[in-house]
Image (cartoon, coloured by chain):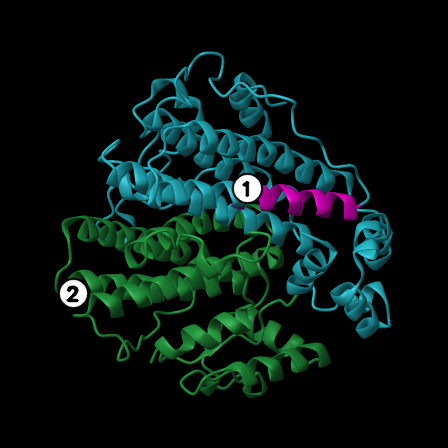
């Protein structure tokens, strides 16, 4: 398990924020939604047992994105390392491309965050059957749709327009991936249940996203310091 | 599209919208959910003032401008698909169904933006009485050749994605409006990927991928302007090609990030189509 040593600055932020009432309320909401593997422990500040702290402000949101990109990259690396039976030439091309895009996203966040970046997360893919096309593409679809809804749901929390633009540059590529994977699974499902009655893509809050992604991440993630708008 | 939908939209990003509008939250919610047709038709004016009150001030002019810009482009896109669906020789079946789905999606975006703009207290820009989908003769067969129609569709979708992205910064921190714009932006990207995949699989453009590789990957020189800077491989000063010792080609580095276009660039690109 990867643990992040908080920088003095982060430590201070954690101390400052403490468990103010709104954060506490939010935290309880998060914790209620979290799955077993995934634990949020705002109350245990300073303790290493509180898990990897995403941090606060824009750094927190970028680390949140970095965590999701780590998950996606690790998944596609495995997909290409152990291709499912019956994989076609086109599917190999696309999945290799997507792997490289996700690695590029992951490394971009790592460098952009520099010393504020969280460490590498440990993943748990035991629920995925990498030899099965249905299992792999079904998981890919879930990850891509989750990613799009995550970026869209967190965009307004960013304070720096440069970071918003960078996230915008990535989210449309994730949406392209999502549509592609959906088409591989079921033709003409490029929108599917991912849009609402106005054909606007659905959004998820960080709490909702991490509750879903947490099933595939064995490192504990502490999202309690993320901005909440 | 109706008032219930718009309030539900807003509720997704602002869980307390009903509370803001009225302390009698439940009553308000129920009113819109089961309200009579008369009430819903009459509502937009009222909603605008309620939203203004809800957020304590008038919606900033800059936000309205971005929404009107988006609506201007959505009117154009919807009319393109409406005419294309009716006139272009699209094969019946899966391909025609896909174009129909995109047409309907654009129409919903038009309705959505009209409602949001009205609710924000402004008058939605109208569609143009007519557009020139040949772009001044550049695409003379836009509705008589299926291949031309899909190629133009791809360019319009890719451009649309870039257009939304280019103005996201003007909505910074605007929970309701930024989230709505991002939501449409992602759907335009889904459309773009679908059109690109269709062109690959039906053999019209066998090497096209659902994402943009390098700069103009359409093979149509006339649309170079729609793909300017898409070949960027540096983001926020971070070089992406072979980043941190990973094997990432320049092609992948460019594909991994879609680039924005400024409003001036977009308006110049769509001007030949009669959009302004």
Q: Position of residue A106 (x, y in %)?
A: 36, 58
Q: Using a 10 Å C-alpha cutoff, classify the residue at mark 1 as few (fewer than 14 neighbours), some (14 to 19) or many (20 or more).
A: many
Q: Could you confirm whether marks 2 and 1 are on the same chain?
A: no
Query: Could you tell me which residue is drawn at 15 percent across and 63 percent down?
Result: A83
Q: Secondary structure at mark 1?
A: helix
Query: Could you tell me which residue is drawn at 38 percent across and 52 percent down?
Result: A179
The residue segment tinted magenta is: B105-120
Is label 2 or label 1 in front?
Answer: 1
Q: Colour of chain A?
A: green
Query: Could you tell me which residue is drawn at 41 percent across and 65 percent down?
Result: A68
Tell me the chain of label 1.
Answer: B
Q: Position of residue A114 (x, y in %)?
A: 43, 58
Q: Nearer the viewer, residue A225 or B226?
A: B226
Query: Could you tell me which residue is drawn at 26 percent across and 75 percent down?
Result: A128
Residue at the limit of the structure toward the top, as seen here? B137
Q: Position of residue A107 (x, y in %)?
A: 34, 55
Q: Is residue A25 visible?
A: yes
Cα–Cα gap, marks 2 and 1: 36 Å
> Where is residue B90, by image quadrant?
top left
Kindly check if marks 2 and 1 are in contact, taking CB atoms under 8 A apart as contact.
no
> Where is residue A111, by image quadrant?
bottom left
Which label belongs to residue A84?
A: 2
Q: Is residue B232 magenta?
A: no
Q: Is residue A53 visible?
A: no
Q: Which residue is mark 1?
A: B106
The secondary structure making up most of the magenta span is helix
Q: Colour of chain B?
A: cyan
């Amino acid at each position: 398990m990867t643990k992040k040593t908080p920088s003095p600055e982060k430590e201070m932020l954690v101390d400052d924020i403490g468990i103010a009432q709104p954060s506490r309320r939010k935290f309880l909401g998060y914790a209620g939604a979290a799955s077993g593997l995934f634990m949020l422990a705002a109350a245990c500040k300073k303790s290493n047992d509180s898990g990897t702290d995403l941090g606060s402000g824009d750094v927190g949101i970028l680390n949140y994105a970095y965590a999701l990109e780590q998950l996606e990259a690790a998944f596609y690396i495995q997909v290409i390392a152990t291709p499912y039976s019956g994989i076609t030439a086109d599917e190999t091309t696309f999945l290799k491309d997507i792997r490289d895009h996700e690695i590029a996203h992951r490394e971009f966040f790592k460098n952009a965050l520099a010393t504020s970046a969280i460490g590498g997360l440990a993943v748990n893919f035991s629920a995925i059957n990498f030899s099965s096309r249905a299992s792999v593409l079904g998981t890919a679809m879930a990850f891509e749709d989750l990613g799009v809804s995550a970026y869209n749901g967190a965009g307004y929390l960013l304070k720096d327009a440069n970071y918003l633009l960078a996230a915008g540059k990535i989210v449309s590529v994730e949406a392209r991936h999502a549509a592609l994977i959906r088409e591989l699974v079921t033709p003409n499902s490029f929108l599917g249940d991912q849009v609402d009655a106005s054909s606007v893509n659905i959004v998820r809050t960080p709490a909702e996203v991490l509750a879903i992604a947490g099933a595939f991440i064995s490192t504990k993630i502490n999202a309690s310091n993320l901005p909440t708008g | 599209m109706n008032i219930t939908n718009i309030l539900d939209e807003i509720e997704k990003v602002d869980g307390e919208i009903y509370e803001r509008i009225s302390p009698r939250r439940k009553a308000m919610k129920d009113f819109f959910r089961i309200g009579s047709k008369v009430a819903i038709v009459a509502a937009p004016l009222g909603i605008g003032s309620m939203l203004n009150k809800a957020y304590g001030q008038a919606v900033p002019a800059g936000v309205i401008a971005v929404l009107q810009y988006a609506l201007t482009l959505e009117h154009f896109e919807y009319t393109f698909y409406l005419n294309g669906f009716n006139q272009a020789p699209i094969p019946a079946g899966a391909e025609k169904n896909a174009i129909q789905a995109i047409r309907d999606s654009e129409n919903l975006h038009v309705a959505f933006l009209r409602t949001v703009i009205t609710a924000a207290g402004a008058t939605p820009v109208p569609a143009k009485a007519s557009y020139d989908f040949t772009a001044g003769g550049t695409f003379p067969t836009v509705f008589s050749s299926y291949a031309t129609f899909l190629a133009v569709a791809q360019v319009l979708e890719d451009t649309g994605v870039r257009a939304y992205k280019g103005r996201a910064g003007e909505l910074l921190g605007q929970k309701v409006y930024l989230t709505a714009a991002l939501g449409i932006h992602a759907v335009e990207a889904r459309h773009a990927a679908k059109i690109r995949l269709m062109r690959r699989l039906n053999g019209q453009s066998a090497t096209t991928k659902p994402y943009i590789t390098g700069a103009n990957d359409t093979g149509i020189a006339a649309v170079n302007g729609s793909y300017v800077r898409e070949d960027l491989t540096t983001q926020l000063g971070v070089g992406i090609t072979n980043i941190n010792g990973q094997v990432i080609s320049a092609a992948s580095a460019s594909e991994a990030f879609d680039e924005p276009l400024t409003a001036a660039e977009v308006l110049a690109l769509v001007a030949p189509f009669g959009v302004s």
